[in-house]
Image (cartoon, rainbow, N blue to C red):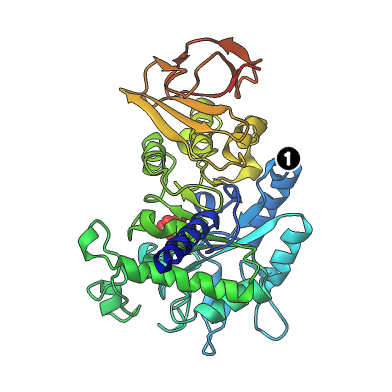
Amino acid sequence: MLKKVTLSLGAAALALMFASPVLAAGTAPVPPMGWNPWNAFGTGVTEERILAVADTLKKSGLADAGYRYVNMDDGWWLKRRADGRIVVRTSIFPSAATPDGNTSLRPFTDHLHAMGLKAGLYTDIGRNACSQAWGGKTAANLPEGSTAEREIGSYGHQAQDMKLIFGEWRFDYIKVDACGPADFQPAKAFVKDGTYRALGPWIVRGKPNARDNARIENLYASLDAAIAAVRPRRDYVFSICSWGEAGVQAWGYKRGNLWRTSEDINAHWKSMLDNFDSAAGHPETVGPGHWNDPDMLEIGNGDFDADHLTEARAHMSMWAVIAAPLLLGSDVTKWPQSLIDIAGNREVIAIDQDPAGHPGKIVSRAGDTEVVAKPLADGSRAVALINRGSGAVTASVTLKQLGFDGAVTVRDVWAHSDATPVYDGITVSLAAHETKLLRVGKTQ
Ligand code: GLA
């Protein structure tokens, strides 16, 4: 009898475990969409530039298409005051100046909220930010003052900072970097000369065995708990930025809504492919609320600018088919209609934002061609046929490989073509760097 009770309790507990969503981090039932200034402006960001982008998102229709989070990255802070409160750099954020000298980003978030947009901010789990490690002495908008005043990261100030950012300032999103515990080790010249205090290192770039993954996971978990204490409804997005380090693939889904899977992207074709691979190869923990983040989009920049629309479409297709966050990283105020049409293609966005939240999975890869497919809520499949190389190729996939056992219809979501019936397989010709993104569904 006793054994039976134990068994059924065990079964109930197990059922509960699998039925309930992981209660951690904020809310992101579909991959977050928006804009981040880093790829366009680095730390040389200003309130004026951000609000100009926000206006463009509204007027171009991109906000209506889903790009609603307007996020700040590194560079917004001036210093940490003796009482621990962060002071905003009012020379670049004039609306943050207050008569009592406290500084507040509330006018900024109020402005974005009044536009129907959402607001995101940036911090670090360590004492210092990435620009302080990597920007040399000359990067724009580095924190100022004494060593202690320049400690603008959340380490040791988690509750105070999250109360300020999510309580007082009402932000909706936070990206949390990890340079603090990675790049301020005792041997660094800027630590030895007293510019910054040593921390860790608990992430040693490129040395997996020297990492303290549990400590990094705990720092993210406690920061999320500090936000939840202010916003118990968890109406925020928590973005982990440890660049695929610290074993984040094993725990990111429990601690954040999205987690970076790689080093920073840059506006080169190869970098885009590398970042795509870092996420496409790890579909395991992707699902509603929890997304691999191969980094912000480079559409509009470098190899993906208005002279490279094939590459821009490919980049967009690849992020969409693996349900990656769509965070624009370019100065959209300068975009021609051709780029707005690419980022704003509603059929492509619908694939990324599909409510079932399935990851894309690699179906095949041969030479420069790759096929990735993502099951969609209506029973159809998004299929990306990718040419990674710089010569023309032919790519094929059978219906069996896609999991269909009868005829299907195929719609090209870039060409907005009519759905054509197909009976055995799909073969397409692809120009250099071209991706075709198809919506493949069972014939009615
Ligand atoms: C890191 C992140 C980038 C950006 C910079 C800011 O490198 O990975 O996305 O936030 O820091 O300094």
Residue at image position (43%, 84%) is 148
Q: Is residue 286 above or below residue 251?
A: above
* Residue at image mark 1: 61
Kindly identify the residue that appears in the image at 59 percent across and 20 percent down.
Answer: 442
Name which residue lies at 47% across and 82% down. 149
Residue furthest out toward the bottom: 83
The structure residue drawn at horizontal position 59% and vertical position 29%, both measured from the top left corner, is 379
Q: Is residue 149 visible?
A: yes
The 10 Å Cα crowd at callout 1, few under 14, some 14 to 19, many 20 or more, is: some
Ligand 1 visible in quadrant: bottom left
For the residue pair 19 and 286, the one nearer the viewer reads as 19
Q: How many numbered marks, from 0 up?
A: 1
> Residue flagged by tag 1: what amino acid is it?
Gly
**SS at mark 1?**
loop
Image: 280 above or below 15 = above
Q: Position of residue 335 (x, y in %)?
A: 63, 38
